[in-house]
Amino acid sequence: MNEAHTPAIDALALGGRIVPGDLPCLLCQARSSAVCSVLGEERIACLNDFVVRRRIDAGGRLFDEGDPAAHYFVVTEGAMMAFKEAHDGRRQITGFLYAGDMLGLNHHQRYVYSAEALNDAVVCQYEIADLRELFRAYPEVEHWLLRHCSDELASAHDQMFLLGRKNAMEKIATFLWFQVHRTRLRSRNLTLLDLPMTRRDIADYLGLTVETVSRTITRMRLAGTIGTIGKHGIDILDIEDLRQRAGGGRALRPATARRV
């Protein structure tokens, strides 16, 4: 990797720590869904020249809104959240990201949101300048990134509708419905959700209070729609009832699942 592409200020702005050693690309849990999925086994080794891995402890920041942006990142282990924060500490979570998801959206070379690890996470770090070289060598990588940007725009529209036109029950049911689809991409268990985020995180994503989230989940549990397991486990007991509570009527499918 060309060191000229890594200004000292950018290296200092990033959180977490570099993971040494070779990239275990063929064993990576994000291999089938991340940008590298378009590269066959015979070409995946080329990423050794472009990528480093970075580990972020649970609760750690990868970068903050407004930081100089010189990198894109792909989540390969754990989960991250993207959010914007007001001057008084209020925040709006704009997305939860899992293995295979990309983050690092920027404008005028500044990150437009903050990124924090929900649990211990690992990301692959791509320098933006190096990506251009990768695009020239492998155009299919650029095509994947364009599809990702389209999905990210569609996800923004999904969330605008979720925040603006649904009541609390519909918001939480839709959130859980979307998580079911995300789980299908990562696990063979289609009904058991292990949510890495807290109730407060869910509230900050849906524009609700923590109390409203807790009450609504309790209502769904008492109705037999879901079961709860500890602080983070949700068992979907009645998938059709969940769909109806989410709005029903039309297919509910998150933008992040549309390209699969």
Image (spheres, helix red, strand yellow):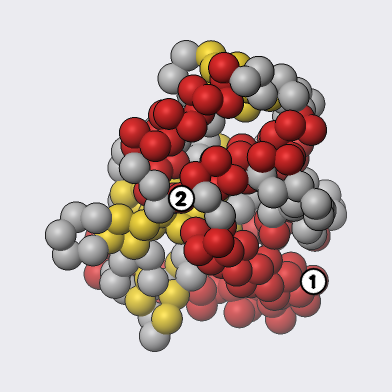
Is label 1 or label 2 in front? 2
Q: Residue, x 43% and y 29% (percent of image)?
A: 215
- In this rendering, the answer to whether 38 lies above or below 100 is below
Cα–Cα gap, marks 1 and 2? 35 Å
Q: Closer to the camera, 6 or 93? A: 93
10 Å crowding of disc 2: few (<14), some (14-19), many (20+):
many
Q: Which mark is residue 206?
A: 2
- Residue 111: percent from left, percent from top: 38, 71
Q: Residue, x 61% and y 79% (percent of image)?
A: 132
Going by the picture, which residue comes out furthest to the top? Answer: 230
The amino acid sitting under disc 2 is Leu
Q: Closer to the camera, 173 or 104? A: 173
Q: Closer to the camera, 54 or 206? A: 206
| Res 141 seen here | no
Q: Which mark is residue 140?
A: 1
The amino acid sitting under disc 1 is Glu
Dividing the picture into quarters, in which one does residue 155 lie?
bottom right
- Residue 141: percent from left, percent from top: 73, 69
- Residue 152: percent from left, percent from top: 61, 66
